[in-house]
Amino acid sequence: LTVPLPFSDRNQGAILSAARLLASAKQKVANEQLKLDSRVRTLSSSLRSLDFEIQQLATSVIPQADKSFSDLEGAYAIGKASFIDVVDSQRMLLSARRRKLEAQRSRCEMQVELEVLTARDALYLER
């Protein structure tokens, strides 16, 4: 009775299985990279939009609302404007200031997320 020894088997099944696992892992990495790249582009675009909005609020909207409120407040003091106009003007000024603060908060949150995704610290890189 003889038993043949399998000298020609070079563990081809395990090698093929490992190659498939490697290809699957590479595909997952590529998919995740695409997702991260897309999120980075979205965040960058949103940051630019928020920067523009903050700048417009700070240079145009808030100063105009502040001037309008001051003018109406002065007009109310001499009896030429109604109290409701003054309160409405003040509400618009406060709303613009609140929107600016919300935009600044959102910008900071997005900046942090972008720094985490790109693994860099903008404050450190500026030095």
Image (cartoon, rainbow, N blue to C red):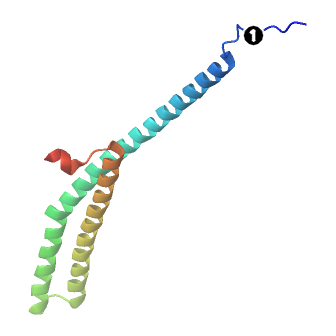
Against 36, residue 79 (above or below) is below
> As displayed, is residue 66 above or below residue 77?
above
Q: Residue drawn at (66%, 13%), measured in percent from left and top?
A: 10
Q: Position of residue 88 (x, y in %)?
A: 25, 81
Q: Residue furthest front?
A: 1
Depth check: give the residue in front, 85 or 31. Answer: 31
User: Considering depth in this image, is 97 or 63 the residue closer to the camera?
Assistant: 97
Q: Residue at x 10, y 92 (%)?
A: 77
Give the percent coordinates (x, y) of residue 118.
33, 43
Give above or below for 115 relative to 31: below
Give the residue number, with chain letter if any, for mark 1.
Answer: 6
Residue 72 lies in what quarter of the image? Answer: bottom left
Q: Secondary structure at mark 1?
A: loop
Q: Position of residue 33 (x, y in %)?
A: 43, 36
Front residue (pair 93, 125): 125
The amino acid pointed to by label 1 is Pro
Asked if residue 53 lies left or right of residue 35, the reply is left
Q: What residue appears at the point 32 percent right and 44 percent down from the top-left corner?
A: 119
Give neighbour class at mark 1: few <14, some 14-19, many 20+ (Cα, 10 Å). few
Q: Which quadrant: the N terminus? A: top right
Outermost right residue: 1
Q: For the image shown, how many numbered marks are present on the structure? A: 1
Across and down, in percent, residue 124 comes to 19, 48
Q: Nearer the viewer, residue 111 or 29?
A: 29
Left or right: residue 52 versus residue 113 is left
Tell me which corner region of the image, top left, top right, bottom left or bottom right, holds residue 6.
top right
- The residue sitting at 14% across, 69% down in the picture is 64
Is 18 left or right of 86, judged from the image as shown? right
